[in-house]
């Protein structure tokens, strides 16, 4: 998929500097950033679902804690 990405000049400059420091293209740097973002979102969703399951399974225990 191809698309145009318009960045604020200061963001573009920071991206350029990061890409140069990491010895890769700006395109690759953006691609890596997007992949890391997507993976973080997946982990966050997994964590939310796991917490929801724990709270549902142990609802009685958490109610007892709230009574103290």
Image (cartoon, rainbow, N blue to C red):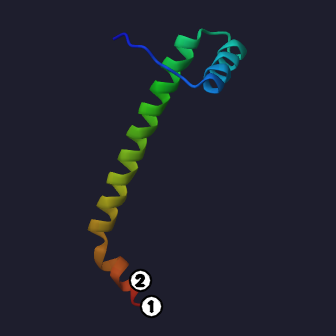
| Residue 4 falls in image quadrant | top left
Q: Quadrant of the C terminus?
A: bottom left
**Which residue position holds label 2?**
65
Mark 2 nearby-residue class (10 Å; few <14, some 14–19, many ≥20): few
Q: Residue furthest front?
A: 9
**Which residue position holds label 1?**
68
Who's the residue at 63% across and 21% down the image?
Answer: 15
1 and 2 marks in contact (CB < 8 Å): yes
Callout 2: SS: helix
Who's the residue at 36% across and 46% down the image?
Answer: 46
- In the figure, 62 relative to 27: above or below? below
- In the figure, 68 relative to 10: above or below? below
- In the figure, 40 relative to 29: above or below? below
Q: x and y percent of residue 30 in the render?
A: 52, 19
Who's the residue at 46% across and 18% down the image?
Answer: 5
Q: Quadrant of the N terminus?
A: top left
Alpha carbon of mark 1 to alpha carbon of mark 2: how far? 6 Å
Who's the residue at 34% across and 82% down the image?
Answer: 63
| Between 39 and 21, the one nearer to me in the picture | 21
| Between 8 and 67, the one nearer to me in the picture | 8
- In the figure, 60 relative to 49: above or below? below
Q: Residue furthest bottom?
A: 68
| Between 13 and 46, the one nearer to me in the picture | 13
Callout 1: SS: loop
């Amino acid at each position: 998929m191809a698309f145009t990405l318009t960045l604020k000049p200061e963001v573009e400059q920071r991206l350029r500097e990061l890409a140069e420091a990491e010895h890769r293209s700006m395109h690759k740097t953006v691609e890596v950033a997007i992949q890391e973002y997507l993976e973080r979102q997946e982990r966050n969703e997994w964590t939310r679902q796991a917490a929801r399951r724990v709270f549902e399974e142990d609802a009685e225990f958490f109610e007892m804690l709230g009574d103290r």
